[in-house]
Amino acid sequence: MQNFFSLILLLLLFQLIAVAQVQRETRAVWLTTNFASDWPPNTFDVSSQKEALREIFRNLKSKKFNTVYFQVRSNGTVMYRSFIEPFTPYITGTVGDALPYDPLQFAIDLGKEFHLEVHAWVNMVRCFTGSNENILSHPAHVRSKHPEWTVRRMRDDGKLSYWLNPGLFEVQEHLTRVLLEISNNYYIDGIHLDFFRYPDKDFNDRKIYNQFGHSLTLDDWRRNNLTEILRSFKKRVKPKNQYLKVGATPIGIRKSLKGAIGWEGYSSVYQDTEKWLQEGLVDYLTPQIYWPFEENPRFDVLADDWVKKAYGKNIVLGLAAYKPDVKIELDKMVNYSRKINAAGISFFRYEHIAQVEDSYFSKLAFPKEMSWKVNNKIETYYNFECNTKDISTSEVLLSWRNLDNNDLRYYALNSFTDDSTFSTKLISPNKSKVKLKFGKPKKLQYKYSIGKLDRLWNETSMCNQFAVNVPYLRSLKKSANISTKPMLATLNDSNSILSLFSSFDQDIVLEIITKENLITQRRVKLSLGQNILKIKENVKLIKTIRIKYGNGKPIDEMNFL
């Protein structure tokens, strides 16, 4: 019998611990800079550009996103300090002009401020599309420097594009160096590869294949050319950030399936995504599943296929927020991603979710776990002392010991309610104190804990759960520990605090009767535990306070005559 009760207690403790975890779900958005689609705005004023990007990050935080795929390379030009490729024209108006600031670094800084991961989104094999001849003719552009590396293509709509030839070792080396330059020079959260593919089967590379294909078929050789770039990058990368996440966004159909037939990643554009996952060359994939549920190719069929073949890595489902038939199903797609245990979702692109008033997410979530990454282990439990100091009648200063730890992303201040649910506030790693303000307290006492979040958002507890009393209600708290009866504490001649204890969440009616028999009523929601209500009536004139259930039945009465 004793073992039985011990088991029950253990289960209860496990449930409490399980509740006190922030949801893990990658919530990403593609932030497009090519053709200045999402950013920068139509101005070359630096302050306007920066404020526009700040507003984007602020908006994403308010919508409870946690990841931004920030496009830093498109059309063979870049949005970061590079010794390899020319600077984008979208910042200054001129290709190759020295940048007045570093857009990638600015985005990284905004990510820290607004608690968003920033992944450098890199267009890989396609090195030009569109009509801006100033880009294509710039002497530092890869097409101008190495025309023999590129293959000219004409799209069905008549638009010109150029693609690098991945069959050339020099091209593989160039693209690897592009990725190394970013990852070694910036403390980014991730590298996100786009257009990491061939344009289609009709690609002019037979001469190179005949020279270097050896015993492989043409299709296998093309697939291997892309995979070799990932292998080279993984072997040589020495990023400042050892937690770097490597991801790619393949086309939506890996291989055709019943209910999902179309242009295939594996055989049409030579993306061997299963091998990338199996060899650990990528930590996540964000397949572009840009179709609704009820049409071929079906969203659910493709989503199931990608998640089932994840090989232990993360699959973030890419959603076409720009398509009307998809946009009306986005909520359903978010829920479906959770149902099949996908790592999360990503919206293409920012503009199409920017004005959405109802967020797709109701609570904070951290990006999905990556258990195979470094240091993703439960660390030694810290048991630091958290100190509190009253600094006013309604403020308490909470402080803790600062950690000198390179993998520290944020501190987490967890605020608990009496039913063990909680909310989390993220605090900068260079801070070790925070003000707790109780301007309109609903309780006499609040409960907190402090945790440490590493670069992969894994939380380690630093301070055990502790209680903080509202300063000007401390004397009332001492009385409340003795009795659960309603209590009235006078603050001044015209304000009082009414303390009510409730055993469950409920609605009540508060009826105040003055000595002149004037009656006022208030409907109040009580939470489980101690509740604090401010009484605005002149307390010297109050005769009776009646507390009633929501149905009007009296449950308590306080008389002051």
Image (cartoon, grey):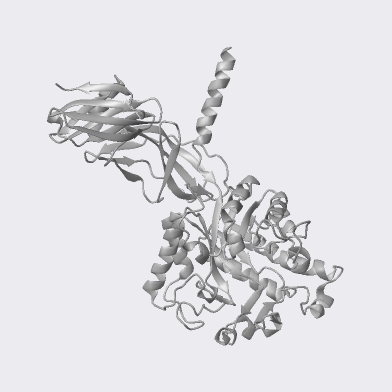
Q: Which residue shows up at 57% across the image and 72% down it?
A: 73
The quarter in which the C terminus is drawn is top left
Q: Residue furthest right?
A: 215
The answer to whether residue 180 is left or right of residue 353 is right
- Towards the viewer: 275 or 182: 275
The quarter in which the N terminus is drawn is top right
Q: Which residue shows up at 84% across the image and 77% down it?
A: 210
Please, is residue 420 above or below residue 561 in the view?
below
Q: Residue furthest top?
A: 1
Q: How many marks?
A: 0
* Rendering coords of residue 526 (x, y %): 35, 32
Question: In the rendered image, which quarter is residue 101 located in?
Answer: bottom left
The answer to whether residue 509 is left or right of residue 351 is left
* Rendering coords of residue 380 (x, y %): 51, 37
Question: In the rendered image, which quarter is residue 449 located in?
Answer: top left
Q: Which residue shows up at 32% across the image and 34% down it?
A: 524
- Towards the viewer: 290 or 172: 290
Question: In the rendered image, which quarter is residue 198 located in?
Answer: bottom right
Please, is residue 205 above or below residue 343 in the view?
below
- Towards the viewer: 473 or 504: 504
- Towards the viewer: 377 or 17: 17
| Residue 84 visible in the shown view | no
| Residue 544 visible in the shown view | yes
